[in-house]
Amino acid sequence: MAIAVANYCFSAVTSSVKFSCSTSSQRRLATSHTSLASANHKNQNFKNSPSTSKSSTTDRKFPGRSKDGKGETERSQSTAFKSFGAQRKDKKEFQFDSKEQLSESGNLQDAAFLNAVVKVYCTHTAPDYSLPWQKQRQYTSTGSAFMIGDGKLLTNAHCVEHYTQVKVKRRGDDTKYVAKVLARGVDCDIALLSVESEEFWKDAEPLCLGHLPRLQDAVTVVGYPLGGDTISVTKGVVSRIEVTSYAHGSSELLGIQIDAAINPGNSGGPAFNDKGECIGVAFQVYRSEEVENIGYVIPTTVVSHFLSDYERNGKYTGFPCLGVLLQKLENPALRTCLKVPSNEGVLVRRVEPTSDANNILKEGDVIVSFDDVCVGSEGTVPFRSNERIAFRYLISQKFAGDVAELGIIRAGTFMKVKVVLNPRVHLVPYHIDGGQPSYLIIAGLVFTPLSEPLIEEECDDSIGLKLLAKARYSLARFEGEQMVILSQVLANEVSIGYEDMSNQQVLKFNGTRIKNIHHLAHLVDSCKDKYLVFEFEDNYLAVLEREAAVAASSCILKDYGIPSERSSDLLEPFVDPLGGNQAINQDSGDSPVSDLEIGFDGLKWA
């Protein structure tokens, strides 16, 4: 496993890929976060799972990327998180961790729980976000999983990202069985698999989920990491338990820090206590020249939440959020000014427009309790005995649609309010639902929604600082809102003079502000005007003659080998996310909320 170019690197672990071979062969969820604001997400740069590093794309050239990765080395990254669970099968360079890597040794050799750990073989076919009508070349990876009963297995979500085929193999068996992906929790980096073959489950003993461990409890990590084909066992102790940044989903949930070696391929494998109970799922590590042996395990509390969510809804809906920007109240003068009588509470600085809290809470409110649990002035709540943990831990215990009772102080008056908790609505998504991005081609002008994978492919330089700032710092004003950009212009006679335009946000079409790409397609289809007028940032205009654009469409598609002028989802009737009763008064970037601020210790998203 190559060490990431950043000084500090947090990685999730699968055995499908070598993680930092080159800039073009690895996925960076928030590389641009650090280049634009080094303090974003507590100064941590999240890196996607190694299973998303594609060997087939190492030779692809994208604007702004340096082939030797120097562009990334020069960035100021104080901390980087890395998901490296899957190891690339076609990579032959290995780097072994000096941590003890035991393979079927001692009294563990015949332990029954080892037989419940299986090896995962996944074939991935990722979308090409720069050319959204096609996919990239497929690649393969390996990871780990384990049996939980009822014909199901658990692994990491990044192990089966963009999967086209998933197979599993039991310990001591040469047969690979086809597995089905039932659910993927991107935010918690967990995936649920099933195997229909009865032969696979013969004499199988599923693992039992244990309780949250204590500090210094012994822990054993089992999986199929890089360095060999057989099962591997490493030992250590529990070093820390706190709310942790999850690299794959760019989320923050409870995590267990251990000092047992976790290497590419361990992703999805279980971690056991000394009683043989599963206490979590290995998923990422922290890499730095200044530290060593820092690995992370998803605790059983998060695993149980994922499974309960799936059982409740028949699908995974995600962890909810409160949707408020908070500030600590450590300063006595600040508490006095807000009429807070004691050393408690956190200040509401802003409320997300898409959250239910937007109808309940106001800027300047002080949250002093959550479901009758007192919130401290540092934004922490009691956790077990003699421990405190981040306030958002309580929120993560809820499910989408649950109601939370908040105790707040508003203008010196204490009151209790109830807020419905739902998953956060991202203006710029970290992952694309359904796998394939939407696109619309009009006379060679290629429009697509802005997303983190697209930013990663195009790199910061080609996206532009202003658009990147809006993507990082703006909040969605309504569910379904998208930032639609002109990705590129396919040269033709109708679009002469626009060939150099790329990665610019389109704001209006014929004077109407655009809500999302489906709205843009609807406006174009229903247009009867002579000209198609597209308004971009900085009052930049692109005007096309409507009849000429329609006539040129088929020739352009044929010349560039594009199967359709739009993605299949845009063939469905347009449904106005605002119901047609509400106009958009301002651009999504006019009043940004800065992730730079959110990342400071004094401020955090709940």
Image: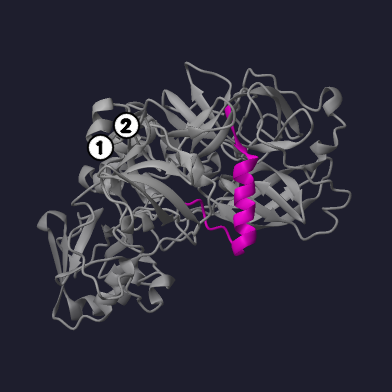
Asked whether, in this view, residue 212 is left or right of residue 84, the answer is right
Name the quarter where the N terminus is drawn. Answer: top right
Comparing labels 2 and 1, the label whose residue is closer to the camera:
1
Boundaries of the magenta span: 295-320
455 to 477, vertically: above or below:
above
* Residue at (61, 27) in percent of width and height: 94
Residue 349 appears in view: yes
**Residue 141, horizontal then vertical, whole percent:** 61, 44
Residue 558 pos. (x, y %): 36, 71
Foreground pick, 299 / 407: 407
Is 313 included in the stretch rendered in magenta?
yes
Q: Residue at x 33, y 31 (%)?
A: 602
Q: Is residue 553 above or below residue 194?
A: below
Q: Give neighbour class at mark 1: few <14, some 14-19, many 20+ (Cα, 10 Å).
A: some
Q: Which residue occupies 68% across, 29% down? A: 227
Residue 208 is left or right of residue 337, and the answer is right
- Please state which of residues 73 and 326 is positioned toward the viewer in this rendering: 326
Name the residue type under label 1: Leu
Residue hosting label 1: 338
Image point 59% across, 24% down: which residue?
Answer: 95
